[in-house]
Amino acid sequence: MDEGSNNQYSHAGGNQNRKKSIIMKRSIRNESLIVQSIILGIAGLVATCTAAETAAKVRWKVTGELEEACSCRAACPCWFKSLPSRMTCDGAQIIFITKGHYGKTSLDGLAVGQFVQSPEHKSMFESFGNWNFDYVYIDDKANEEQRAALKALSGHFFPPAAKSREFRFVPISRKIEGTEHACTIGEYGFVSGHLIEGGLGGPPKVVNPPLADPTHKQFLQGQTTRLTYRDAGQDWKYENSNYMYNKFDVDNKGYEKHEAAMAKMMKAQGM
């Protein structure tokens, strides 16, 4: 073999070695990136778990008033696991906090509300997790710390029941004139209602309905004067429908016990 051939093979061998070296470097770099990704993923998972554990340990207490209304004819059958009076149950809950705290964050004088809608011809309970929409409205008077606290509390007061949840920060107010309670939720919703008279005097009281939670352990029954809502692609206009009112005093311990019981019940029913 002549010198030219040797040089040719020498160059070819050198090129192959360089290619192998480049491939090995790329492989090492890719492996390094994969290891880094795994480490970051584990770190993120640990951080998430730690944050969840910390959130679960937050102590909170709220004393307040519940204003609730929906499209059903009074009294709302959804609280008894029955089908809504109309095709869907179009509902609103607004909580006005008289005194409260989430950890060290004061929530005195703030409010939080929710508007939801069940699927057609399905009860709220059997369709939980698949409601048509779930919008939560947080008092815009709240500072950043209070907003975070109210968002966390909304997960207890209003368990997420649709595939996604929207949050809005809006002015929330209430005006009481005589027996009429009128609540305004930004430019989106308006709930005006009053208690009705029971057969033996005083408003009817519903105690421990099948779907009771600590805020709905009992409530007084009423009727709306007007319920309107324009958001989430809706345009509600209801009159003389279901209205409920309650004063309550709840805390994290009561809700932890209730949520554990609900999870057990839903698991037993295959939900």
Image: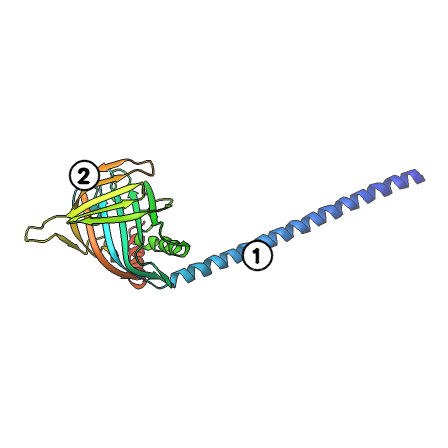
Q: Relative to residue 73, is residue 150 depicted above or below?
A: below
- Please tell me which of labels 1 and 2 falls first in the chain: 1
Residue 191 coordinates in the image, percent (x, y): 23, 44
- The residue at the point 28 percent across, 51 percent down is 269
- Residue situated in front as seen by the camera: 97 or 198: 97
What crowding class fits label 2: few (fewer than 14 Cα within 10 Å), some (14-19), or many (20 or more)?
some
Question: From where the camera sits, is residue 81 visible?
Answer: no
The amino acid at mark 1 is: Ile
Identify the residue under disc 2.
Answer: 239
Identify the residue shown where x is 22% and y is 48%.
175
Helix, strand or loop at label 1? It is helix
Residue at the limit of the structure toward the left, as seen here = 200
Left-right relation of 209 to 257: left
Q: CA distance from mark 1 to mark 2?
A: 58 Å
Instruction: Estimate the x, y position of residue 206 in percent, counting from the top left.
Output: 16, 53
Point 86% across, 41% down: residue: 9
Residue drawn at the location 85% of the way across and 41% of the way down: 11
Q: Which mark is residue 39?
A: 1
